[in-house]
Image (spheres, rainbow, N blue to C red):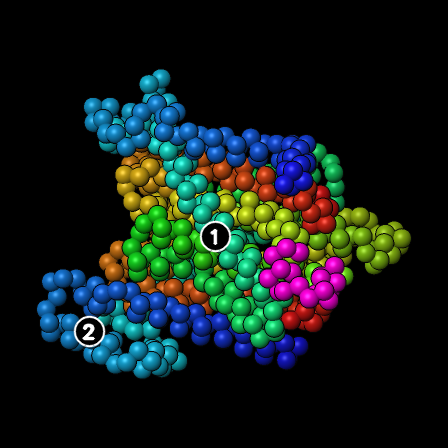
Amino acid sequence: MFIYTVKRFALAGLILIVAVTAMFLMIRAVPGDPVSIMLGPRATPELKASLIEQMALDQPIWKQLLIYYGGLLRGDLGIDVFSGRSVVDIVFQQLPYTLEMIALSVVWSAALGIALGAYAAAHPNTIIDRVAAAVSVSFVAAPAFVVALLALLIFAVQLQWFPAIGVGEGFWGRLNHLVLPSFAIGLSWVGYIARLVRASMLEVLGEGHIRTARAFGISERRIIMSYALRIAILPVVTVIGVGMGFLLSSAVFTEIVFARPGIGKLVIDSITTRNYPVVMGTVLVSTGLFVLSTAIADLLNALLDPRARSTK
Amino acid sequence: MSNSRSELSIILRGVAKDPLGLIGLIIVGTIAVSAIFAAWIVPYDPIGMNIPDRMQGPSAAHWLGTDNLGRDTLSRVIMGGQVALKVALPAVFGAMAIGLTLGMIAGYGPKWLDNLLMLFFDTLRSFPTVMFALAVVALVGPSLQTVVLVVMATSIPTYGRVARTQTLTLRNSEFILAERAMGASMARILGVHMLPNIIGVLGVLAAMDVPTVIALEAGLSFLGLGVKPPTPSWGALLKDGYALIRQTPWLVVGGGLPIILATLGFTFLGESLRDVVDPKLRKNR
């Protein structure tokens, strides 16, 4: 397990290094002089010179890359061109808003999905199972930002049950503002998780120890709740970890639709103002989050299911 | 050739027998037909402005109302389907072709090449899709081609990994060993013998991938970073509708429902195709 952990994190580190280098080279490969693009045509020569010095643009490219890596190691992602604030500060100030929205989405959709999946597996091929299956596929299909827009239109604009924009004040206010966004992000996960749990539950229910438990006369309800479910929800852990990239992507749109602060709003705002250091910093932090959550999901999976360790 | 045609009709018949597959086939067929003949069936010019008729709700003259420039929403929805497929089809087929080639090479070639390609796939996959798309669009500017390229790049790893796994399981099967013993070249083995065995699974993957691509294109256009106005796209409709959500909510419905319908159609079709093409993948259904 120790060797697997080291290997998995080494792979994650390698992926991040390649990703950072690729990003960096891509930005430098864009035709035109980055300084004029960032500052616009009316920048004074002094301003340009100071930015060139600040971003080390007068150095050869490999040296720039090393300087950037040096900064990364010290937790420095550069400076916001406009406000002069550190990019790390800006990104980590916005990140909690995004994470709380994603966390709430995952919690409600996983809870409902697991319940639906377990119920369907306990009553296979009944009408409820079939309906749940069809609904699951349909929910999987709904892109988060379309759901977000329709939810905004129906529940905020027309019915006015929930606030349309912002984050709100106090615990209940904040929660109230989170309802529609996390509904939009979580909806497609309900069906996905339900299908996953149903399939893995049916597999577990066919195994020997469950048959033994049945032979002992333990109630079906207890078998499902305390024996089968514990094993059947393992894949959910992996899927949520691997789905982090997907969740972050949904969060970008949802934040725009509901005008919530967060890294999605940050990256879009920075793109429209051509604030490259902030764009790059946000993309890197979210990539890092994604790589980390995938690695943790793999490790958890290996910890909980020893068979997974040997595959890689 | 006649052989492969009869195979296709067998697959289609199998899909049509499954109720969900039939629904999927009908939805996808409708979208495809209306996209192909869009120019002839639109009731109005999708980019023609008509200021006196602006911001009208649904009526007999404009079934889905008009936007703030008086453009007919239904016409824009139909034309938007064409734009969606123009992005989705090249992106999906491009990604499939590249992913298939790289994946087969990774599965069949030397170990170091395999490791290198896997690292490439893993890296490409490690960017959250939308963040990657936004970074590229920020750098090179929004356009239809950019969207196609970005979408293609992000889905290459999926096809690559599946093609690699399939190649790995096939490479030691008897008919490949026999072919190798007869001195067939790598290109011949991969192209003539492996490809027909892998393409079915990838085709299923492609059908399932189309909705993701359509949603991404719509999402980028919604953010104003996809296809440029006045090109009618479902995402652009959502953008216009969102800006005036209190005045012209029918734009949000007009842009949102086709995306959900298209997603449903392609997902149903893909699921049903999977059951027909590869019954082994069918799990406890």
Nearer to us in this view, B111 or B219: B111
Reply above or below: B243 against B103: above
A32 horizontally vs A130: left or right = left
**Chain letter of the residue beneath label 2 in the structure image:** A
Q: Mark 2: give few (<14), some (14-19) or many (20+) Cα within 10 Å.
A: some
Instruction: Evaluate if marks 1 and 2 touch, with contact meaning CB atoms under 8 Å apart.
Output: no
Q: Whole-percent x and y of residue A84? A: 22, 70
**Local crowd size for mark 1, using a 10 Å CA cut-off: few (<14), some (14–19), many (≥20):** some
In this rendering, is residue B178 above or below B56?
below
**Which residue does the image show at 31% across and 39% down from the upper left?**
B231
Give the spatial CA distance, label 1 vs label 2: 40 Å
Q: Which residue is label 1 attached to?
A: B94
Residue type at numbered disc 1: Gly
Q: Which chain letter matches label 1?
A: B
> Which numbered marker is on residue A123?
none
Residue at mark 2:
A51
Q: Nearer the viewer, residue A266 or A29?
A: A29
Type of residue at label 2? Answer: Leu
- In the rendered structure, the answer to whether residue A56 lies left or right of residue A107 reads left
Residue A207 appears in the figure: yes
How far across and how far down the image is residue A205, in percent? 78, 52
SS at badge 1: helix
Bounds of the magenta segment: B175-193
